[in-house]
Amino acid sequence: MLYPSINDLLEISDSRYVLVNQVSKRARQLVEGSDSLVRTVDTKPVSIATQEVFEKKIGYSSSYTMEMEQQDYEDKCNAFSNLMGE
C-alpha cells in the first residue's frame, strides 16, 4: 500500500488537479537540485514531493487568492486614507 494514500492527500489538497500540479512542480524542483524538506528513505522525486505535501512542508496559493488578498489590502489602505482625509 502506498503511503500516504490518495485519500490522506485529498484531505490536505482542494482537488486532485491541484495535488497533481503541486507534487509535479515540487518533484521537478527536486530533480533540478532543490533540497528535500523531509527526512525519508525514498529517493524518487515524486515520492519525496508527495511526502512533503502530506507533511505540509509545501503548499500552494492560487493566483486568484493572491489577487483577492491584494485587492482587499488596497481597499483597506484606500479606506484608511479617506478616513484620514488624504
Image (spheres, rainbow, N blue to C red):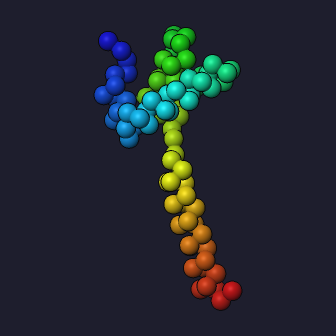
Seen from the viewer's position, the closer of residues 25 and 58 is 25
Residue positioned 38% across, 21% down in the render: 4
Residue positioned 33% across, 28% down in the render: 8
Q: Is residue 31 visible?
A: yes
66 relative to 3, above or below: below
Residue positioned 46% across, 24% down in the render: 50
Q: Position of residue 63 (x, y in %)?
A: 54, 50
Q: The C terminus lies in which quarter of the figure?
A: bottom right
Q: The N terminus lies in which quarter of the figure?
A: top left
Residue positioned 51% across, 38% down in the render: 59
30 relative to 13, above or below: above
Q: Is residue 12 visible?
A: no
Q: Position of residue 32 (x, y in %)?
A: 67, 21
Q: Position of residue 16 (x, y in %)?
A: 38, 33
**Circle count:** 0
Seen as rendered, the residue at the extreme bottom is: 85
Seen from the viewer's position, the closer of residues 24 and 77 is 24
Using residue 25 as the reference point, say whether residue 54 is left or right of it.
Answer: left
74 relative to 30, above or below: below
